[in-house]
Image (tube, grey):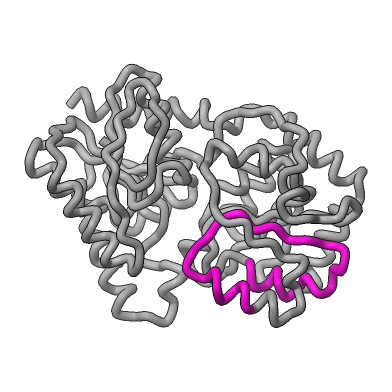
Amino acid sequence: MLIALADVRRDARTLNAARALASAGYRVGILAAGSLRAEAGITLYPWNDPGGRAWRRWQSLTRAAAALDVRPRVIGAMDFFAMQAALLLRRRCDARIVYDAREFYFALGPLQGRGWRQRVLSWLESRYVRRANVITVSGPLDADVLANRYRLRDRPAVILNAPPYADAVASTLLRERAGVPGNALVLLYQGVVHHGRGLMPLLDAMPLMSDVHLCVIGDGPALQELQHAAAARGLSDRVHWLGSMPYDDLHAWTCGADIGVTLIEDVSMSYAYALPNKFFEYMRARIPQIVSDLPALHDMIQRYPVGLLVESALRPAAIVDAVDRLRRSETRDAFAAQCDAIRDVCYERQASVLLDVYASQVER
């Protein structure tokens, strides 16, 4: 049983895990919002996401778990907010819990300056980490931090946020949907629209790049504020808010961009160590990217040179310089070839780690 405070159609990590487990012969249930086409071995238990504040959604998910008539052997808590539901289910059937720790809740970016909330979440995280049977994370530095902070006996297993392997496809979806002129350069940001994700520094840089359009695939709590910021900078005709879309449709849209944007602001340890899905999704689409020079992303770019690092301060001039370097077709082509050569960074490789983790718990 996988539990996620998310729309399963848009939650790559949960969807990929469910498919890998089902392909290995496990019967997989998912408690999450949204809908899912029929897939062998996977049963969706739809959760009616009430929206609104995180606390309200968190409690709603926990109540939905309490109402389930299931007795799983292993429960995958696919995010921090699923752990309470997982612990509740475990009382009923003595299941094992795999906790997918996607963020550091003791140092969460959006909670900077909100001391009491940060302290509550930090306390809960320490409780959850110690009550899980196994922990998985999305990057090797995350594994080191959690193991050291909580003095874990076993280092968390690392499962990168890489998508399944796919060839690049010729795509005009972004240009057609946004009405981008043929001679303009298309930057793409995909993911949660939130503070600290590099969107505000990018908006500050956009007035210095008159022939550049930005497409944003995703939504989130900072959407309205960032839309107002774009309008205030006179960018309404060059910044296109396309909303979120199902994960299975995303690759074709990503392939239509010229440059991907993986700019994360250095506002917390959780952000500094992030290895977001978009980094690997741009790689699979064979488009180069501009990347914040933060610890986890720096290490990844050194290992897989698929884009250009931008100083962590994210000054507009530094962003413009990186875009100018990548606007040269020969430079973009060289990075695209590099992306194409890296064939082993895909979910098919990560799935073996996931299957080992779950098999170790089923056999207990």
Residue furthest to the top: 25
For image coordinates 60% across by 28% down, the residue present is 165
| Quarter the C terminus occupies | top left
Q: Is residue 227 left or right of residue 358?
A: right
For image coordinates 44% across by 52% down, the residue present is 142
In the rendered view, tell whether residue 319 sits above or below residue 143: below
Q: Position of residue 316 (x, y in %)?
A: 76, 73
Residue furthest to the left: 92
Q: Position of residue 46 (x, y in %)?
A: 29, 43
87 vs 40, nearest the viewer: 40
> Visible in this render: residue 180?
yes
Q: Is residue 85 left or right of residue 150?
A: left
For image coordinates 88% across by 51% down, the residue present is 182
Q: Is residue 205 magenta?
A: yes
For the magenta stretch, what is the residue range? Answer: 199-228
326 vs 184, nearest the viewer: 184
Q: Is residue 207 left or right of residue 351?
A: right
**Hey, which quadrant is residue 200 in on the image?**
bottom right
Q: Position of residue 16 (x, y in %)?
A: 45, 34
Number of disc labels: 0
Q: Is residue 353 magenta?
A: no
**Hey, which quadrant is residue 97 in on the image?**
top left
| Quarter the N terminus occupies | top left
> Visible in this render: residue 147?
no
Q: Position of residue 35 (x, y in %)?
A: 38, 40
**Hey, which quadrant is residue 36 in on the image?**
top left
